[in-house]
């Protein structure tokens, strides 16, 4: 390895600007790289980030697109700065180093290894199979929120869970509409649901796993919205990773659009959370 890349100046961006960039940039227009180790990534990562440990960067550079901005981060900024310098030295035109790394992130996160949930997508699915899997994922979350409503400690939090469940029904409507316009031989919705839906929750985790991981206070609307944001981040992460896995054709594009829709939903939930925190404060 040559020493020259370590002295190439690179663009640095603080976490506030990075969150804004990610929020306003479509899934397919920005490539995010996590250069930490798999165990670090598993504990928490920026949704949609590709795991390429810095020690593997040199041999996996072909995985990184040169025609879009590349955002690189690590734990605190040291490894990512080195990675950004290496990529700049390799001729990548727009490489951004996340200042402060994941420790300073303070944005939505996803958990799990890069292959979590990807068993739903082999990479060879037709567009109708991709949308059927997405519909099934959304149905899993709708059922999750409905189940949590039954566990809620009071009617206010129960109502909030039911509203979240209703939003997932709207997501399903959107997916089915897309299916009807893109599938070669679309089924009637009743048959589509009966034959395709398999009850997988968004992000590939079970209800019990979510409860155990996030331990929400069932009397707190702030905790419930925070939980919803975390779960939607898992969905966005899964759709993002799956869109890369089946990038060819309309299936990958459909999943990238679903990731963008989840990102928009997270923004709306974040605004609601900000309102609740201000009221509480």
Image (cartoon, rainbow, N blue to C red):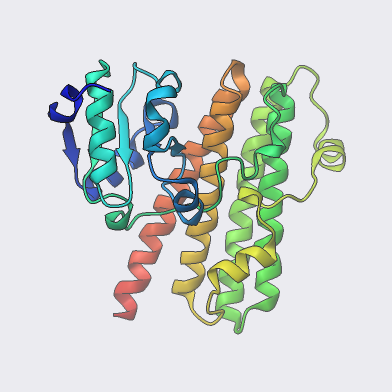
Residue 117 visible at all:
yes
Left or right, 2 with reference to 137: left
Quadrant occupied by the N terminus: top left
Left or right, 186 with reference to 261: right
Which residue is at the front of the view, 160 or 98?
A: 98
Left or right, 150 with reference to 221: right
Residue 183 image point, x, y percent: 73, 21
Is residue 166 positioned above or below 73 on the image?
below
Residue 262 image point, x, y percent: 50, 44
Rendering quarter of residue 81 = top left
Residue pictured at 69% horizontal, 67% vertical: 208
Rendering quarter of residue 245 = top right
Which residue is at the front of the view, 42 or 271?
A: 42
Residue 39 image point, x, y percent: 49, 52
Residue pictured at 73% horizontal, 44% vertical: 136
Residue pictured at 60% horizontal, 15% vertical: 249
Quadrant occupied by the C terminus: bottom left
Rendering quarter of residue 205 = bottom right
Residue 240 image point, x, y percent: 52, 36
Residue 64 visible at all:
no
Is residue 13 positioned above or below 182 on the image?
below
Residue pictured at 43% horizontal, 35% vertical: 52
């Amino acid at each position: 390895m040559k020493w020259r890349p370590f002295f190439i100046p690179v663009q640095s961006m603080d976490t506030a600007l990075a969150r804004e960039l990610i929020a306003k940039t479509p899934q397919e227009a920005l490539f995010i790289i996590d250069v930490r180790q798999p165990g670090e990534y598993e504990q928490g990562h920026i949704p949609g980030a590709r795991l390429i440990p810095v020690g593997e960067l040199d041999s996996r550079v072909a995985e990184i697109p040169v025609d879009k901005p590349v955002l690189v981060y690590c734990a605190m900024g040291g490894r990512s700065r080195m990675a950004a310098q290496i990529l700049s030295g390799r001729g990548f035109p727009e490489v951004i180093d996340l200042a402060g790394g994941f420790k300073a992130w303070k944005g939505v996160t996803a958990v799990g290894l890069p292959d979590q949930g990807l068993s739903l997508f082999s990479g060879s699915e037709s567009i109708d199979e991709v949308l059927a899997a997405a519909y099934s994922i959304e149905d899993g979350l709708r059922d999750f929120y409905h189940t949590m409503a039954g566990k809620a400690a009071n009617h206010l939090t129960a109502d909030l869970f039911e509203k979240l469940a209703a939003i997932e029904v709207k997501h399903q409507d959107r997916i089915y509409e897309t299916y009807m316009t893109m599938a070669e031989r679309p089924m009637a919705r009743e048959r589509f649901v009966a034959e395709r839906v398999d009850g997988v929750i968004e992000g590939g985790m079970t209800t019990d796993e979510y409860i155990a991981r996030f331990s929400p206070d069932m009397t707190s609307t702030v905790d419930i919205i925070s939980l919803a944001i975390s779960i939607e981040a898992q969905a966005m992460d899964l759709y993002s990773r799956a869109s890369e896995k089946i990038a060819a054709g309309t299936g990958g594009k459909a999943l990238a659009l679903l990731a963008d829709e989840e990102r928009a939903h997270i923004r709306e939930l974040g605004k609601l959370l900000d309102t609740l925190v201000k009221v509480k404060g």
